[in-house]
Structure formats: structure tokens, C-alpha cells
Amino acid sequence: MKTLSVRKIGNSLGVILGKEVLAELGIAEGDTLFVVRTQDGIHLTAYDPDFAEALEAGRDYMRRHRNALRELAR
């Protein structure tokens, strides 16, 4: 397990990812990350256009069928 420190970067706050973490994620400077909230906390993963498209399709479906999904949840 690695710990990261929150640092001031300009007017924002951020964390610095070490070489090992960058290599494990398969990312480099300028790449985009997904930040996903889970029951266990936050999950970072490398941006994947196919996953982004599927995620947006799922969100669109849930918006269009909000009432039906609410009824099913009961």
C-alpha cells in the first residue's frame, strides 16, 4: 500500500503519482484518468474510450428509464 500527500498545485490541490504507480496504470504526463467512487473509496484507472462510451450509454439509459428503475428498486 502506498500513501500520497496532498499538495498545493497553483490554486488547486493535487497528488503526485510516482513512477511505479504511473507504470502500473500505464499512463504518462497528459493522459486522462477515470476517477470512480466505490464502496471502498476512490478507484483510479487509465482512460479507455470504449469504457467511456459504455459508461455514457449506461448513464443515458438510466436517465431515460429512471421511473422504471425506481419501481424495480422497490
Image (tube, rainbow, N blue to C red):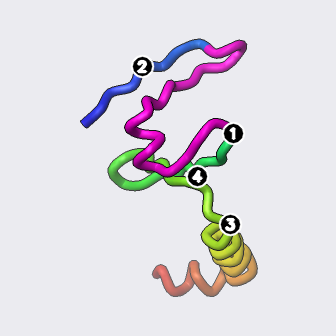
User: Dot 1, how many residues are within 10 Å of its Cα: few (below 14), some (14-19), or many (20+)?
Assistant: few
Numbered disc 1: secondary structure? loop
How far apart marks 1 and 2 lie (CA) works out to 20 Å
For label 4, the residue is 34
Q: Position of residue 23 (x, y in %)?
A: 44, 44
User: Dot 3, how many residues are within 10 Å of its Cα: few (below 14), some (14-19), or many (20+)?
Assistant: few
- Mark 2 and mark 4 in contact (Cβ < 8 Å)? no
Numbered disc 2: secondary structure? loop
Is residue 66 visible to us here? no
Q: Is residue 10 left or right of residue 71?
A: right
The amino acid type, in three-letter code, at marker 4 is Phe
How far apart marks 4 and 1 lie (CA) works out to 13 Å
For label 3, the residue is 49
Q: Is residue 53 left or right of residue 74?
A: right
| Span highlighted in magenta in the image | 9-29
Q: Is residue 26 above or below residue 72?
A: above
Label 1 vs label 3, nearer the camera: 1
For label 1, the residue is 30
Q: Position of residue 20 (x, y in %)?
A: 38, 37
Label 2 vs label 3, nearer the camera: 3
Is residue 48 visible to us here? yes
The disc, 2 or 3, on the residue closer to the chain's N-terminal end is 2
Question: Which label belongs to residue 5?
Answer: 2
> Toward which corner of the image does residue 70 lie, by quadrant?
bottom right
Nearest the viewer among 53 and 38 is 53
Numbered disc 4: secondary structure? strand
